[in-house]
Image: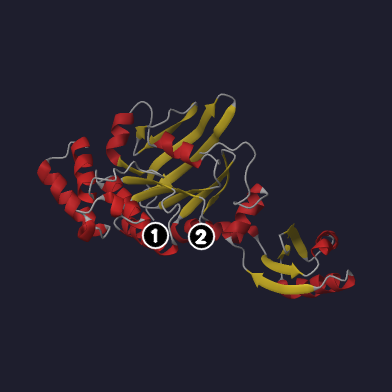
Amino acid sequence: MDRTVAIDVSRLCKTYDTHKAVDDLSFQVYAGEIFGLLGPNGAGKSTTLRTLITLLHPTSGTATIMGYDSVREADKVRTVIGYVPQERAIDRFLTGREHLQLLGALYHLSKEEATKRIRELLTLVELEAHADRPAKTYSGGMKRKLDIACGLLPDPKILFLDEPTLGLDVQSRLRIWEYVRMLKARGMTVVMTTNYLDEADQLCDRLAIIDGGKIKTMGSPVELKIALGGDIVSLTLKELDRIPALETELKRQPAITSVRTTTKGLDIRVESPEKALPTILESANRLNCSVEFIQYNRPRLDDVFIAHTGRAITESIPEAESA
C-alpha cells in the first residue's frame, strides 16, 4: 500500500454547547486505502466526516486533505473530494441522468465533459439501462448507486461515504461493496463510516473504532483481532439463572482470560481451547449448569469492539447525538 498521507487529522474536537461530539481525534489516511470509522449511532463518525469535507468547522485541532487545510483552504479541499451522504435529496421526478446533468452544471463541467463523465459513471454503477427513468421508480439499491455516481462526478481523489449501505437488502449491500472495491482498485482513496461490523471487516484496509467521540483503537481488521489474543468459547445454557454463578466461577480459573455474559450464556476468552475446555465443562457440571450448545471461534470484529468499548455495537449510548 502507498504510504503517502492523503488525510492528516490532529487533535480534532467538535463541541455542541457542552457536548463533545468529537473528542481529540488524531489519525492518518493513506493514499489508495479504504479507511473506516466504525461505531454505533451517536459515536461521532458523521461529525468527523462532515468536518473533513468542510461542512463543519472544528472547535479545535486541524485536518488536512491532500495537503489542504480543511478550514483555511476549504475551497481547494472541495476540488479533490467527492461525498456520498447517508441520505441524498433525490428529486423523485428527475431521471437518473437528469440528476447527474444538474450536478454537472453545479460543478461547472463543460457540456461535453459532463456528457462523457455521465456516460462512464452510468456504466460503472450499472444504471445505463435505467438512466432515463424517474428516480421515484428506483429501488433502494439503485438510488444508492445513483448516490455513488453523483459523488464520483467531479472525479475526486478521495471519496467520502457516510453509511454507504444503511437500510439496504443483503444483495444491494454486496453490490455496493463491489463498487467500493473497484474504486480502490482504480487507485481512489475511500473514507467511510459504518456501524456494520461485517462491512468494516470485509472492506476496510484499516479502521478506527470510535465511541463517545474518541478513537478507542485503530488498525487493520486482522491486526485488531490478533491483538486481542486468545480464542472465544461460547456457551449456551438451558437455565439462564445459572449464568452469574458460572461466570464468577470461571473468572477464577487461570486458563481463562475473560468472561462476558450474553443473552443466552457466556462468551469465554481462552488462551488455549484444548486446555480450557475441560475446566469450563467441569465448572458447569459442578454448578449443575446444563450446557445446551458450545461453540468455538477465533476473535471477531465484534469481540474487538466489545473489548475496547465495554459493550456491543448494537447497545445504545446514553444521551447519544445522532452523529
Asked whether 74 or 33 is in front, the reply is: 74
Instruction: Name the residue located 50 percent from the left edge and 33 percent from the top edge.
Output: 12
Which mark identifies residue 177? 1
Vertical arrangement, residue 71 with respect to residue 212, above or below: above
Q: Position of residue 320 (x, y in %)?
A: 59, 38
Q: Is residue 126 left or right of residue 283?
A: left
Residue 250: in sight, yes or no? no
Amino acid on which disc 2 is placed: Asp
Marks 2 and 1, how far apart at CA: 11 Å
Kindly indicate whether the residue at mark 1 contacts the one at mark 2 (C-beta within 8 angstroms). Answer: no
Q: Earlier in the sequence, mark 2 or mark 1?
A: 1
Vertical arrangement, residue 45 with respect to residue 225, above or below: above
Q: Is residue 203 left or right of residue 127?
A: right
Q: Secondary structure at mark 1?
A: helix
Which mark identifies residue 205? none
Q: Which residue is mark 2?
A: 198
